Structures are given as C-alpha cells and as structure tokens.
Amino acid sequence: MSEPGNIVIVGGGFAGTTLARSLERMLPAGRRVVLVSEESYTTFNPMLAEVVGAAVFPEHVVAPIRQMLRPASRFVMGRVTSVDPARRVLTASTLAGPQEIGYEHLVLAFGTRANMDLVPGMAEHALPLKLIGDAMFIRNRVLQRIARIELETDPALRRRLGHFVVIGGGFSGVEVAGTLADFLRGARRYYPRVATDELRVSLLEGAGRLLLELPESLAASALRSLSSRGIDVRLSARAAEVDASGVRLEGGETLEAATVVCTIGTRPNPLAAQLGLLLQRGRIVTAPDLSVPGADGVWAIGDCALIRNEPNRSDARARAAMSAGALAYAPPTAQFAVAEARFLATNIAAHIAGRSTREFRYVSKGAMATTGHLKGVAQLFGLRLSGLPAWLLWRAYYLLQMPTLGRKLRIWVEWTWAMFFAADITHLRFTRTHEADVAPQPEAAAPAVR
C-alpha cells in the first residue's frame, strides 16, 4: 500500500489513539488515518496497579483500538521494522508477513520500554510493571507466595515469602504499594494458616520524599497514608543489588524478600535508534511544533519524544530550573500525551491546509495518585486534596478517559462492587487442554536466608 494521503501513526498508546481520533474529525477528503501498533489495544497504564490488586478485571484497563477508530480509518497490528524517508514508506512485520505502508505524514508515538538494568540483578530477579501482562503476573505471583507460606514450616522462609518490596516512590510505586497492602490484607482471610505479621510491604525511594511531581505537603500526606496501613516506606534508600533473596541497599542493609516489584527506569524503544533521528536522553528531539527536525513529514509525541514546554507558573522547581538556564520538557505522563496528541492534530490539519503551525505549550492541570483503597493525594488547578476526595477524583478522571460508554459502565460497576466486597483471589493459570494432566512444578529451592 503506498497512498500519499495516509497519515500514519506508529504506536497505540494514549498519544497515538488520541491523535487518531482527533485527526478523524479534522482531515479533509482524500486523507486517511492509518494506525500501526504491536498490540490490538491501548493499555491504561495508570490503572495497572488496580489489576495487581484485583480491583478491576484485566480487560477493563485495555481498550480495543479497532473499536476506537472510525470505519474510514485503518488499523494494522504489526511492528514497524524500517522507514524509508526517500520513498515515504515504512515496513511493518505483521501476521501476514512484511507489509509496506506509504505515508504523507508519519507520527512516531511508540512510547518507551522498561529499563531493568539500572540496578544489578534487577533484570533477573525483579518484576516490572509496564504492561498488562506484568500486572497479571505480579497478581498471580502474590497469590502463589501466600499459598506457599501455608505449606512451609521454616519461620524465616515464611517471613521472606511474605515480604514484598516495591522499588520506586513515584506514582506507580506508591499506587502499587498501597494496592498490594490492601490486597494482602483482604486475601489473608482465605488463608487461615498465614499470620497477619507474615505479610508485609516495603517501598524504597532514593530521594528524600515520595511523589516528586507533587507538592511537599501532598508527598507527606501520601507517606502518612501508606505508613498508617503498615507499609514500611524507606526514603533516601537506594537499591544496590537485587537477588533471589531480596534487596541489598547502598548502606549495606539487606531486605529479605521473595518478591521485588520494579517501577523505576525506562529505556528507548529500539525503533528510535534505528530511524537515525536526533536523540537526547533516549528520546526523539522535536521542534516546537512537534515536527522532527531534518525529517520532512515526520512528527513525534508521547513518551518517545523530547518536547520543550514552558513550565507551569505554579511549579517552583521548573521556574528555578528555567532561571538557571535549564530547559523545561514535557513529562512522559498520560495527561501530556493526550495534550500533545490533540495539539498535533491541529498542526497536521493546518499543515495540510497550507497554514502555519503553532508551538506546543501546555500547562499541567495537576497530578494525582492513589495510596490504597479510599485514599489518595491530588493537586488540581492548584487545589490540594487528600484522602477520599483525592481517591474519588482519581477514579473519575480515568473513568472519563475510557473511550466507550460500555467500557465506562463496566468499570464503574466493577469499582462499585469492589468497594463493598472482597477482592477476587482467583489465580489464573490459563491451562490448556493438553496441559491439564501435567503436575504443577515447584519453585526452585529458596536460597538460604542470609
């Protein structure tokens, strides 16, 4: 396929799907949106912690891309392997083999990958939380650990099996730590041979406070909320090594834990380096209008793009950085991805119509995080909230982001159900028929407690 009227979007995350839906309403006749993504769905990553804690079903935090697009648009499930800028053609690896797709405009919105190499041993022994499969795996691992504790007799081993360490005190780390604590407390009632003090959660943050993107008062509120439910929050605590026995901190202390969850670090999508574009910090450098310098017809948005942005006037740290000569860049968050996509849609439409494009400027509306069931912290238009109001605001925001009324209703029903009833503790093995008679394999022998 080599059609000059194609606006091809690579990436089906928040940025890519929002751009596609916005362009569908703006493009003149003769142009068509083509979205290429390795997955057939968009994952609402801020809700992955909800999957870990069984607050929602996994399918509720993903939205089928085909459902989100109009019939006139085209979706191709495949991985882009190369781009020929001279011919304006990209090649995608699909279920039907390599496919060539021509473009008039090409938008790169393929996000980033998890970086598990920041700490020695983390790639081998820690569990990332980046994809829906990661969330399901962590949930199953938690249930496996509790079930195994019932069968073990060694007190030291039981304590290690019941200790869950989360690395990273940002939004994902705080949310998964709070959710894990709630899930463990709710699930324990079904495991009568497991004592309350045998299940615990620790949260490690290298900085001196949690949630650096939020004001100090809200970070302190989040700390109190987590600590009040028994979570051991360690500030200024950096992991030096992760192994099968737990986490060794830079100060020499060792936390014995059988399960370590990693929420820190990203690395570039390999495609970013393959395209030969200018990269900084592993992200594609863009011009102020979100075009890619030196690449005619190519634009970039979302986590894969390094986009300059004026700081929020209420953000003292950003203003200080600007006054010191540092550049301010759009953070890799869902809020900014959506804002960039909507802005780029107007610029592409303007370019097609022969009008001038504009420079990207966006002021953050705020930020929020849950710290467990019925608890959270939030800043919205300068207003600071904590506790139940922040938790409700968080849920309302992400409910509104869901693309269809049916999906919104399903999540609302599931959330309402979870407020009054115990979380689902089903361990989904996805056993196929030919595997039904295969005996479960025990885990490798646990290392001796140091």
Image (tube, helix red, strand yellow):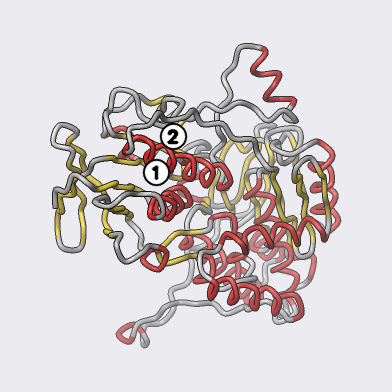
Left or right of 76? Residue 279 is right
Residue 182 image point, x, y percent: 74, 66
Residue 40 badge = none
The mark that comes first in sequence, 1 or 2, is 1
- Does residue 275 appear anywhere in the picture? yes
Q: Secondary structure at mark 1?
A: loop
Q: CA distance from mark 1 to mark 2?
A: 8 Å
| Kind of residue indicated by mark 2 | Ala
- Does residue 48 appear anywhere in the picture? no
Residue 321 in the image: above or below residue 296: above
Residue 68 in the image: above or below residue 432: above
Tag 1 and tag 2, C-beta contact below 8 Å: yes
The residue to which callout 1 is attached is 109
Viewer-proximal residue, 115 or 17? 17
Residue 305 badge = 2
Residue 318 image point, x, y percent: 67, 25
- Residue density around tag 2, few if under 14, some if 14–19, many if 20 or more, within 10 Å: many
| Kind of residue indicated by mark 1 | Ala
